[in-house]
Image (spheres, grey):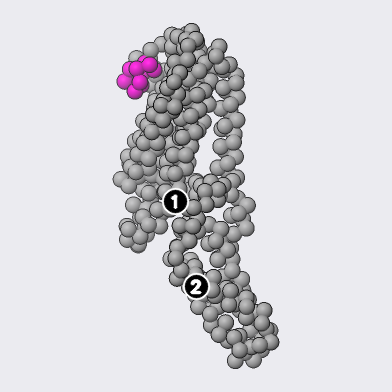
Amino acid sequence: MIVDLPKFVAAEEPYWTRLERILAQRQQDPWAPLTLEAAKELDYLYRRAGADLARVASFSAEPEMRRRLEQLVARAYAEIHGPRREVAARLRPWRWLSATLPRTLRRHARALWLTVAVTLAGAAFGGIAVAVDPEAKEALMPFSHLRGDPADRVAEEERAMSDRLSGHKATFAGELMTHNTQVALFALALGIAWGAGTIVLLFYNGVILGAVVVDYLLACQGVFLAGWLLPHGVIEIPAILVGATGGFVLARAAIGRDDGRPLAVRLRAVADDVATLAAGAALLLVWAGVVESYLSQYHEPAIPYALKIAFGLVEGALLLTYFGWAGRGRAAEAAP
């Protein structure tokens, strides 16, 4: 029996408010991993609210308080004992795209910056190698059309007046999407080997990128290079980095430093984030494939370089804005 109702409410109100905030946070982002400490807190607050409900159930003078506790306990019970709500969340593509994907990437910002650092290191190595020894590109370039003189290739591309991909644009775009998605997912999957494979693949991709950029710049073909690479590259390269970020998330779970949980538990804890990053990388690469097939492969006089460069810069700015700010409002509203 409650002797002093105001004192009881004053003592218990912080616990009810805390439980409401946790439940609101879970509703906003059902994919967010729940740590052991957070799960224990949720269970404790649920049991405490249940005990409080039992104490006020016969207190007819406060029907609003009783209804509030009944709803709170019911929501907590559904969160703990009910079916997982992630299934419903996965069927809400707009929420996933507008909030879950960018927030997941920001949550693993350190892993993302590691992918950037490894790629830049590879680019520096490839660029220096070509600058010091131009013949090195024979060993570094994986495609034959990149091993020749950049000036000759530019002249050939600008002389070609016919539509080389006429009737084959969709096929070419599909091949690009398939190949690049395989690279991104391969970089992610290699994370299970403690991230070593992911690092090697990122470094190698960086070497190719750096070698190509320096080779074309030394040949004074920077404008052609920007018009060729920017439209699809500002999406394609970040997409591979997003996939590789998932690889490093997987690697951290596999290593489990200072983590007493079993490997299977650690992998389950990051499974949703890894799946989100993989899907995000694949989605970006679909767009990059379309742009490369329908825009990047066409040069002056067919399409002005300035237009292609401007298109790429706008794409890059939009992508940075999306990953940097999308979903922040919802995160703030759900913050405990």
Residue nearest the observer in this picture, 186 or 198: 186
Q: Which mark is residue 54?
A: none
> Which picture quadrant has residue 321?
top right
Name the residue: 45% across, 48% down: 276
* Residue marked by disc 2: 77
> Which picture quadrant has residue 61?
bottom right
Q: Name the residue type under label 1.
A: Asp
Name the residue: 47% across, 58% down: 86
Looking at the image, residue 14 lies above or below residue 51: above
Task: Tell me the quadrant of the picture where the C terminus can be found.
Answer: bottom right
Q: Residues within 10 Å of mark 2 (few under 14, many from 20)?
A: some
Disc 1 to disc 2, C-alpha distance = 25 Å
The verdict on residue 231 being magenta is no
Instruction: Indicate left or right for 111 with 326 as reference.
Output: left
Label located before the other in sequence (1 or 2): 2
Q: Name the residue type under label 2.
A: Tyr
Mark 1: secondary structure: helix
Mark 2: secondary structure: helix
Magenta span of residues: 136-147
Name the residue: 56% across, 32% down: 316
Q: Is residue 124 visible?
A: no
Task: Tell me the quadrant of the picture where the N terminus can be found.
Answer: bottom right
Looking at the image, residue 107 lies above or below residue 182: below
Say if mark 1 contacts mark 2, CB within 8 Å: no
Name the residue: 60% across, 30% down: 314
Name the main secondary structure of what is drawn in magenta: helix
Q: Which mark is residue 273?
A: 1
Q: Residues within 10 Å of mark 1 (few under 14, many from 20)?
A: many
Instruction: Indicate left or right for 255 with 32 as reference.
Output: left
The verdict on residue 146 being magenta is yes
